[in-house]
Amino acid sequence: MKATKASLAGLLILEPRVFGDERGFLLESYNQKTMAEVGIQESFVQDNHSFSQRNVLRGLHYQVQRPQGKLIRAVAGDILDVALDLRRRSSSFGRWEAVHLSGENQRMLWIPAGFAHGFRVLSDSAHVLYKTTEFYAPELERTIVWNDPELKIDWQLHDNQPILSAKDRLGVRFRQAEAYE
């Protein structure tokens, strides 16, 4: 597993070893020992599978009190995955990073607890799988509005409007969000 540190503290872009031939390929998407070797010591408690159409934008979501670390990958399709650092004591507090994940590039993104997370589908559709370090708790979930002018996240929309859930349309601005200590 190749691990590359992203520009935000704790964020890792992971590239698994892929064994391919004329039949297809095999890759190890998760191995506890390998993850520990690249610095991911956390245990995962839940797996999620999201399917979305082109221009669906999900996020920016996070949980208060029980923040979730997430290991994310697109198994089919292409997404722009965005992580926003909400850790007040972090050198990258308030900064975001966007990473292309796709079934083709087979990259994964490790987002440690303390970040808000979202993604936009760039292809016709996408299947996104992610592991979490905490169980989903809807009463603790919060949303930061995707288009906060202070954050200036480049969702690569190119004048298209994203498809949003009602919850995501009602997100709060970054300055109103509950950050982590």
Image (spheres, grey):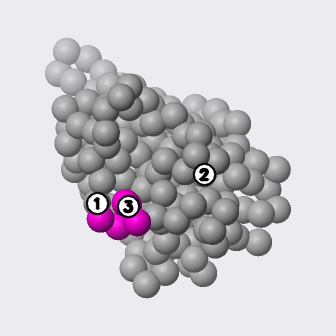
Start-end of magenta stretch: 166-170
Q: Please name the residue shown 45% across and 36% down the image.
A: 155
Q: Which label's residue is closer to the chain start, 1 or 2?
A: 2
Instruction: Give the mark toward the camera: 2 or 3.
Output: 3
| Labels 3 & 1 near each other (Cβ < 8 A) | yes
Question: Dot 1: within a 10 Å radius of its alpha carbon, few (fewer than 14), some, or many (20 or more) residues?
Answer: few
Disc 2, SS: strand
Left or right placement of residue 40 versus residue 157 in this view: right
Q: Give the amino acid at mark 3.
A: Asp
Can you see residue 16? no
Predominant SS of the magenta segment = helix
Question: Dot 3: within a 10 Å radius of its alpha carbon, few (fewer than 14), some, or many (20 or more) residues?
Answer: some
Q: Please name the residue shown 59% across and 40% down the image.
A: 152
Q: Is residue 91 above or below residue 1?
A: below
Instruction: Assign the C terminus to one quadrant of the image.
Output: bottom right
Left or right placement of residue 166 versus residue 8 in this view: left
> Which residue is denoted by mark 3 in the rendering?
168
The spot of residue 75 in percent (x, y) is: 29, 39
The spot of residue 115 in percent (x, y) is: 60, 58
Q: Is residue 29 above or below residue 85?
A: above
Q: Could you tell me how far apart the alpha carbons at marks 1 and 2 are, in whole angstroms?
A: 19 Å
Q: Is residue 17 above or below residue 61?
A: above
User: Does the magenta portion include 167?
Assistant: yes
Q: Could you tell me how far apart the alpha carbons at marks 3 and 1 are, in whole angstroms?
A: 5 Å
What label does residue 84 carry, if any? 2
What label does residue 165 carry, if any? 1
Q: Please name the residue shown 64% across and 47% down the image.
A: 150
Q: Give the amino acid at mark 2.
A: Leu
Report the front residue among 127 and 56. 56
The spot of residue 85 in percent (x, y) is: 66, 54
